[in-house]
Image (cartoon, rainbow, N blue to C red):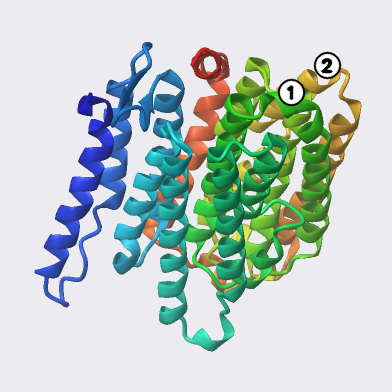
Amino acid sequence: MNLIVAFPECFLGLGLVATFILNLFRSEEKGALKASPALILTTAILCFLANTSCPESAFNGLFISNENTSILKVTFLIFTAACALLNSNRKQDILFGIIALGICITVSFGDLLILLLGIEIIFLSLYALLYLEKQASNEPEKISLSPFLATAALGFASLCIGIALTFFEVSPLFAGAFIIVGLLIKMGAAPFQTWIRAVYKDTASSTAALFSNVLSFLLLFVLFRLLYENFLELESVYEPLLLIVAIITLALNSLMALKAENAKLFLAHACLVNLGMALSLFSMGITPRTYTVLLFFFILQAPIGIGLFASLGRFSLLSEVKGMASIAPKSTFLVIVLILSLAGVPPFSTFLSKYLLLQEMILSSHYLPALFVILGTVFAVAYCVKIVESMFLGNENDEAEKSCTSVFMVTILCVLSALFLTFFSYELLNICKMASEALIQK
């Protein structure tokens, strides 16, 4: 048993236990210790240092490590740390660390039961976050968590049935169907996204950014790996079905983003449009090139979404950004960079990711998903223009001036990350190729 392979996860787990114990002895005046962002970032560094080109395993093969898992863990942990830094409630801080631990377990699963354990650690912690936010709300009776709980339970049941059918070697078609449906439910893909409107508009920006830009894409990578390792022989069956789900997700969220008045709902739907675009890649087949484009697309998109939640998520309504350009010019500049990046306007980083995505689709003669990606981009430009117009031409609103240090810091870091990734996109693409080769060679 090679425990060194799981040293970053052990470090994070022990750090969370130590933080919890220290919080028990801290006085109410000092408040809870906010240590999760530092712990998560340190774990990401350890994952980077522990990266190896040779696949290794621990716990009798239940936990695996290779270049793909290391790259995924470093990426997801960095984005999770950004969301944890955005969170202002110290009582919720440790839950972000538990979610990060669940992410590591999910990425490195060597067995379906370990995968289920990692996913449920994440979603139980997410439910706890939503519950604490409801309790802290001035009007908790208006926040209903029932849709989220019901959807999470339905996804859990579907995953359990699929895993059980796999263990009993029942038809892979039925087992794969239940597992795929369970993952689609949990990632919020259409038509399994009825809970989003009920939850997102009243949740904190940090939690909304974490789910729509990190956790939903995490499940997308899990789906890709499961399809490659367990259900590749059913490729001709699930590819058209996933394409239909991708098109519905992209179209539905594009329309809902245009109609949304609530700021967090707008951002959630805008980010789920990207999820639909990424999901459409599955129609090209489970190949190293598909995985490379998927990872490249995610890494370039995620900081944009998190930055927008940091900058605009503090507003209840989109109308509150009116006149922001004259009141807060620095924040306005950052928001414009993020908005243009979200829309995929050249030369920003997301233009490169969408260009590569479209290029792969057209070269492989997948014209239908390419058409919907183009339409989704047109819709993105439309609702981004609406926000920019309101910021410059609307009446001044005092709410637009309010901000805090952590929010401004996360926004700047996300903008700098987007610009950095734009300049070093070639090197990033090579990293994504290494990850895909490690997955396929496993």
Looking at the image, is 208 positioned above or below residue 115?
below
- Residue type, numbered disc 2: Ser
Residue identified by numbered label 2: 364
Marks 2/1: CA–CA distance:
10 Å
Please state the horizontal and vertical placement of residue 274, each as a whole percent of the image: 69, 42
The answer to whether residue 334 is visible is no
The percent coordinates of residue 61 (x first, y second) are: 35, 27
Relative to 91, is 125 on the left or the right? right
Would you call the spot at circle 1 few (<14 residues within 10 Å), some (14-19), or many (20 or more)? some
Horizontal and vertical percent position of residue 4: 21, 26
* Amino acid type of the residue tagged 1 in the rendering: Gly
For image coordinates 50% across by 52% down, the residue present is 210
Query: Does residue 377 lie above or below 230 as drawn?
Result: below
Point 55% across, 69% down: residue: 149
Secondary structure of the residue carrying tag 1 is: loop
State which tag comes first along the sequence, 2 or 1: 1
Asked if the residue under mark 1 is in contact with the one under mark 2, i.e. CB atoms within 8 Å, the reply is yes
Image coords of residue 11 (percent x, y): 21, 39
Which label is found at residue 285? 1
Q: Quadrant of residue 29?
A: bottom left
Viewer-proximal residue, 376 or 63? 63
Image quadrant in which the N terminus is located: top left
Instruction: Answer left or right for 243 relative to 199.
Output: right
Quadrant of the rendered image containing residue 176: top right
Q: Which residue is at a point 48% across and 16% down the rendered structure image? A: 442
Left or right of 139 on screen, residue 271: right
> Residue 29, relative to residue 32: is it above or below?
below
Task: Name the disc covering residue 371, or none.
Answer: none
